[in-house]
Amino acid sequence: MGTVTIGVSIAVPEPHGSKLQQLRAGFGDAAAHGIPTHVTLLPPTEVDGAALPAVEAHLAEVAARGRPFPMRLSGTGTFRPLSPVVYVQVVEGAAACSWLQKRVRDASGPVPRELQFPYHPHVTVAHGIDEAAMDRAYEELSDYEAQWPCTGFALYEQGADAVWRKLREFPFGSTTVPPQAGRVETGSLPAR
């Protein structure tokens, strides 16, 4: 089966997800339409495709121990000059995101992963674009607000076309999930 690139994240629900994705595209970020709006729990990680069942079982265990929590986004931040990123801040739910990402990347699990930078939950709205567009994203979204109850997370795979597609959702507090339960059929995703 070869290697696949996966990621784990909390989706930003509608109408917020589409709005932020459209704004990201409007700032000139060419990757915007291939990346669903999200808060990362596991950054892009290459794994052997044969390991996906073990990854899914691990994520189901993490989700079973999790509980719904409030998520609130407010204002902007940036990682510049270390990384060319402008983001919307997670001002409520950050501790729960940190707890989740540690368990997803746990050294005893199938996707142990060291991070390049310390974990900081956020929603990227501009990445790798020119400085003027980054400044515009920072200013235009400085008063952005959104909130919702976070009830789970999802596993995504990056396709050869660089588009991220949801493979499976993991609701919090669920007991053992049969192997195909919660799986999203790729054919049901809209073409981009």
Image: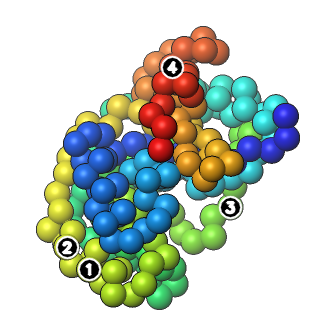
Q: Tag 2: residue type?
A: Glu
Q: Is residue 2 left or right of residue 41?
A: right
Residue extending furthest top?
178
Query: Sequence order check: which comes first, mark 4 or mark 1?
Result: 1
Residue at mark 2 to residue at mark 4: CA–CA distance? 36 Å
- CB atoms of marks 2 and 4 within 8 Å: no
Residue highlighted by disc 4: 182
Residue under the point 74% across and 44% down: 4
In this rendering, the label closer to the viewer, 3 or 1: 1
Q: Residue 114 — which label?
A: 3
Q: Is residue 84 above or below residue 182?
A: below
Q: Is residue 107 above or below residue 59?
A: below
Q: Mark on residue 136? A: 1
The earlier-in-sequence mark between 3 and 1 is: 3
Across and down, in percent, residue 65 comes to: 49, 29
Identified by mark 3, the residue type is Glu
